[in-house]
Image (cartoon, rainbow, N blue to C red):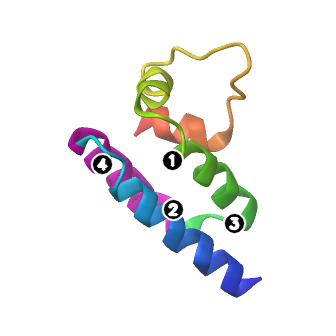
Amino acid sequence: MSDNKEELKNKIIYRASYRGSKEMDILMSKFVNSLIKDLNFSELKELDSLVNLDDESLKNIKNDILSEKTNRTNIIKKFQNF
């Protein structure tokens, strides 16, 4: 499980840094680096889902414009407060 956790961390860090728009690259990479060391495997999976959303969805989440189907997870709350 340790190897899987480290692989997932590396995947998340890479995805957060290479999103497409420079502004979101900066925001997501700083957010991810600020908390990734302290997350358990379940939280890492939530973070992985978050960093794989498109930029428009992330912007809406950051601005607290959540759709009905968006589950307000602990990771989303941390992102909104970042």
**Is residue 22 depicted above or below 61 in this figure?**
below
Q: Gap between marks 2 and 4, in whole Å?
A: 12 Å
- Is residue 49 rendered to the left or right of residue 28? right
The reply to whether the C-beta atoms of the residues labelled 2 and 1 are less than 8 Å apart is yes
**Farthest residue toward the left?**
22
What label sits on residue 51 in the rendered view? 1
Q: Gap between marks 2 and 1, in whole Å?
A: 7 Å
Q: Gap between marks 3 and 1, in whole Å?
A: 16 Å
Q: Type of residue at label 4? A: Asp
Q: Position of residue 34 (x, y in %)?
A: 40, 59
Q: Gap between marks 4 and 3, in whole Å?
A: 23 Å
**Is residue 58 depicted above or below 42 in this figure?**
above
Sequence-earlier tag: 2 or 3:
2
The reply to whether the C-beta atoms of the residues labelled 4 and 1 are less than 8 Å apart is no
Say which of marks 2 and 3 sits in front. Answer: 2
SS assignment at label 3: loop
Q: Type of residue at label 1? A: Val
Q: Position of residue 53 (x, y in %)?
A: 53, 38
What label sits on residue 40 in the rendered view? 3
Sequence-earlier tag: 3 or 1:
3
Q: Type of residue at label 3? A: Asn
What label sits on residue 25 in the rendered view? 4
Image-quadrant location for residue 13: bottom left
Image quadrant holding the C terminus, namely: top left
Circle 1 packing at 10 Å, graded few (<14), some (14-19), many (20+), is many
Q: Would you say residue 31 sits in the magenta stretch?
A: yes
Q: Which residue is mark 2?
A: 12
Sequence-earlier tag: 2 or 4:
2
Name which residue lies at 66% across and 76% down. 5
Number of labelled discs? 4
Q: Would you say residue 64 sits in the magenta stretch?
A: no
Query: Which region shows up in magenta?
Result: 22-37
